[in-house]
Amino acid sequence: MCIILSTHYYKQWYNHSHVAQTTKAAMTNELRRLEDFLIQTGFPAEEKINFDRFYYDPTTEVYEPFDEEMIDNYILHLKMKNSSDNLLYNSIVYLRSFFKFLKAANLIKHNPVAFYRNSHYKRPIRNKWLSVDECNKLLHLAINKDPDLKQDYVLLLLMISTGLRNSEITNLCYHQIDFERDVIYVDKGHKTTASTVYMTNTLKRVLKEYTNHPDYKKRLSNGNQRLFYTDTGREHSPASLNIKIKKLCKNAGITHVNVSPHSFRFTCARLMFESEISLVTIQRQLRHKYLATTLRYLGLDSASKELIEDLSNITPDVDYE
């Protein structure tokens, strides 16, 4: 009884959609659940579904497409089976992706999930950011450790104020800094597409001092473009940067949270927000595709998220930044 999985809809999606095999398997299971529901509601098991001619309306004598009301009934059916919020959320995400593909491929005229509200997103907010006081402790520790070159001080200040990712920091080179435009060009790193982040006046000043230091100029003259190096003079890797950050935090007495380089993306977002910088500007600085991701970084409550989603029609992206 495959009223969906045996159709050209499913075959075209399965053969031509650009999703991972694990995702295809999960979405196939979701479509099986939808099939079972439709059969329980009376859809003939021997018929293949036509999403554009799903209902027959005797008052108008025309066929109506598969619509949001049917999705509502399906979600209610799942709720009555005591499905978790996670399953309900994923069901809507998978159906949205499936029907979006069908619409883009001109296989259907109407996407019933295009504007369907997904109110089952229940991802707990964890405190991943550092306070202003903790940032100051780290910076004070770093500058006392190396008052001459100040490499760790510059590294920490850059991470706190730009929100760059671990791999973007470790790949950062001198030529990416534009002191005239007050920006850093970012084009290397995990999840990175070519873009820019802004520098504060303080960061710009200390970067100039750092890159004009004789020790750094010597590295540069030897062809070493990387901005930061380990204490032994080697190029940083994401793993070595993680070790350095944990060591600095331990020495500064910061133990309430498991700090990693990624914690500074959360910290950057939070400090900008507390400085009353707009959400869109924070999203731009962190280069998030969805504003809902930025809201999660800020630790805003679900009511705030729902308001933003209402205004912007945003689907929260479940990436794992």
Image (cartoon, rainbow, N blue to C red):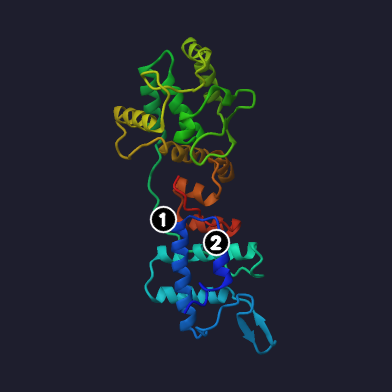
Which residue is disc 2 drawn over? 15
> Where residue 267 sits: x, y (%)?
44, 38
Please say if 52 is above or below 171: below
- Which of these two is toward me, 277 or 197? 197
Q: Residue at x 48, y 74 (%)?
A: 34
Q: Is residue 316 visible?
A: yes
Type of the residue with mark 1: Arg
> Where residue 27 sits: x, y (%)?
47, 64
Left or right placement of residue 321 versus residue 49 in this view: left
- Which of these two is toward me, 94 or 177? 94
- Which of these two is toward me, 8 or 239? 8
* Residue 232 picture quarter: top left
> Where residue 217 sits: x, y (%)?
51, 12
> Where residue 102 sits: x, y (%)?
60, 65
Which residue is disc 1 drawn over? 123
Q: Pointer 1: residues within 10 angstroms few (<14), some, or many (20+)?
A: few
Q: Residue at x 47, y 79 (%)?
A: 1
How many marks overall? 2
- Which of these two is toward me, 13 or 97? 13
Secondary-structure class at tag 1: loop
Q: Residue at x 63, y 85 (%)?
A: 56
Type of the residue with mark 2: Asn
Please say if 243 is above or below 320: above
Secondary-structure class at tag 2: helix
* Residue 245 picture quarter: top left
| Numbered badge on residue 167 | none
Q: Calculate the distance from the C-alpha at mark 2 to the C-alpha at mark 1.
A: 32 Å
Please say if 284 is above or below 137: below
